[in-house]
Image: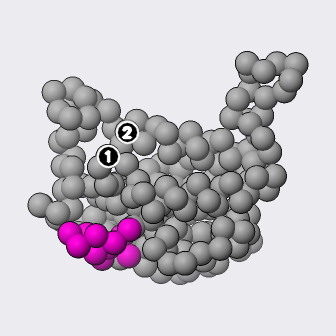
Amino acid sequence: MNKNVLLINGHQYWEISPGELNRSLIKLAENHLIAKDYSIKTVHIDDIFDPKEEVKKMMWADFIIFQTPVYWFSLPWGFKKYIDEVYMAGYGILFDDDGRTKTEPEKNYGTGGLMKGKKYMLSTTWNAPRGAFNDKAEIFEGKDEDEVFFYFHKAQQFVGLEQLTTFSCHDVLKNPVIESDFKRYEKHLDKLF
């Protein structure tokens, strides 16, 4: 059975970050998945988009890959804007309220997602070296990438998506190992798809 994958390039252009790595990771995933007979749709948040059309793409997809650089410990603001606009356009389609009832207003918050059965993967590119994670003395205080992106994962859970294993490239500006990252990414995709 043919499966559908939506690839979302969350890179927002900056002079120091023109987006080549994120574009290359999107292209690598696209080629890898097409070779395995997946149907692919791709969107880049820097392009003009219609939120209602993006909702249709999300509902078409069995899997969503969110590819993003990390700017100031978070998503680029243009990617956050994309998520805000698309998810709000998807009210009643991607999610139905927040999951609570009037009889139990303190329970089940975040369970109103309508995308159950669909899965997503987060793929990130960081200037932070790998050593900045999992060491309590470093800036991330021993937290891994998923813990740093807790809010992002909760937003996906809110709409009903199930998380697949996150992929990350580190030290991409000062000490890049791009070919090694590409090989790791192909192995990562092989395990998931």
Distance of label 1 from label 2 (alpha carbons): 8 Å
Pick the residue in front: 27 or 72: 72
Q: Which mark is residue 148?
A: 2
Q: Position of residue 50 (x, y in %)?
A: 65, 73
Image check: 188 left or right of 120?
left
Magenta span: predominant SS is loop
Decide if residue 75 is in sight here: yes
Image check: 113 left or right of 174?
right
Which one is closest to the eye, mark 1 or mark 2? 1
For the C terminus, the quadrant is bottom right
> Crowding at label 1, few (<14), some or many (≥20) Cα neighbours within 10 Å?
few
Q: Residue at x 74, y 26 (%)?
A: 108
Residue type highlighted by circle 1: Phe
Q: Furthest-right residue in view? A: 103
Secondary element at tag 2: helix
For the N terminus, the quadrant is bottom right
Check contact, mark 1 vs mark 2: CB within 8 A.
yes
Decide if residue 188 is in sight here: no
Residue named by callout 1:
73
Q: Position of residue 110 (x, y in %)?
A: 68, 35
Q: Position of residue 24 (x, y in %)?
A: 35, 76
Which of the 4 quarters of the picture holds residue 19?
Answer: bottom left
Image check: 168 left or right of 77?
left
Secondary element at tag 1: loop
> Crowding at label 2, few (<14), some or many (≥20) Cα neighbours within 10 Å?
some
Q: Which residues are magenta?
A: 12-23
Establish if 86 lies above or below 99: below
Q: Which mark is residue 97?
A: none
